[in-house]
Amino acid sequence: MAKKLLLIFILALALGAYLILRPLLFEKKVEPKITDRLPDEEFIGRVNLLSFARESQKITEKNKVATKDFLSYDFLLSQSKNYGIDLSDSTFVFGNNKGEFGLVFNVKDSSKILSGINRLKLVYPIKDSLIEKKKIYVLKKERLYFYYDKNYAFLYKGNKISQKFDRIVHAKSGSITPKWKEFLSDKLFKEDPFVVILQVKNYPISD
């Protein structure tokens, strides 16, 4: 009788442990959104590069901007398709008054990005490096860093690459900062292709 009671107790204990641990054991890992990865800085903002290029095309042509062909809607669209970058959605920007800044943008096909990097290596002294065993691409003199994953990429210029890298790469689902959450929930300039806010201001600057 005692053996039966012990067996029932063990089975009940095992069942209870299974029911408690089951959600943890079989829980699907939710990938963070690109907005969960964004770090805070003195200024933050978003830009839709394709929309901005389309709206500013007449201005660049009228003022005979030397690089207008590289800023055109058609050129940016073709390059984004060739190298797997998604410029149809928002690109997020952050930076400070020391000239340090970063861009975080969506990636459609990460398998195409390396070919673009290899083309740039023919012109610029881009070196491969590692941060936390992850490959990044560096222009050392310019303090310019580039990293990409399957769903996103970021470009950073400045001295805080380790800090920004840790925030962006190791973000968890739902970890969007209050500053970014407030900024992105503001509907006042929702349709504008370029919006930036400064920490010292209480209003956005749009173009």
Image: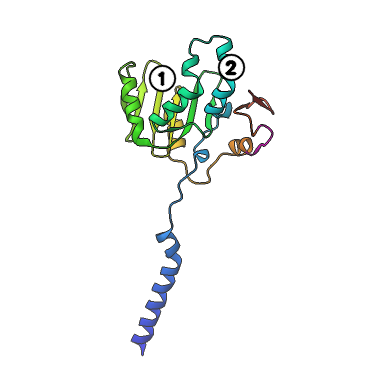
For the residues labelled 2 and 1, the Cα–Cα distance comes to 33 Å
N-term mark: 2 or 1: 2
Could you classify mark 1 by the number of other residues whose Cα lies within 10 Å: few (under 14), some (14-19), or many (20 or more)? some
Q: Nearer the viewer, residue 46 or 60?
A: 60
**Quadrant holding the C terminus:** top right
Q: Residue 72 magenta-drawn?
A: no
Q: Secondary structure at mark 1?
A: loop
Q: Position of residue 29 (x, y in %)?
A: 43, 52
Q: Is residue 174 left or right of residue 187?
A: left
Q: Secondary structure at mark 2?
A: helix
- Residue 141, placed above or below residue 33: above
Q: Mark 1 sits on what residue?
A: 143
The spot of residue 161 in percent (x, y) is 43, 27
Viewer-nearest residue: 67 or 100: 67
Q: Report which residue position mark 2 lands on.
A: 58
Looking at the rendering, the stretch of residues picked out in magenta corresponds to: 185-189
Q: Position of residue 8 (x, y in %)?
A: 39, 82
Along the line of sight, the residue nearer the viewer: 94 or 190: 190
Categorize mark 2 by other alpha carbons within 10 Å: few (<14), some (14-19), many (20+). few
The three-letter amino acid code for the residue at tag 1 is Arg
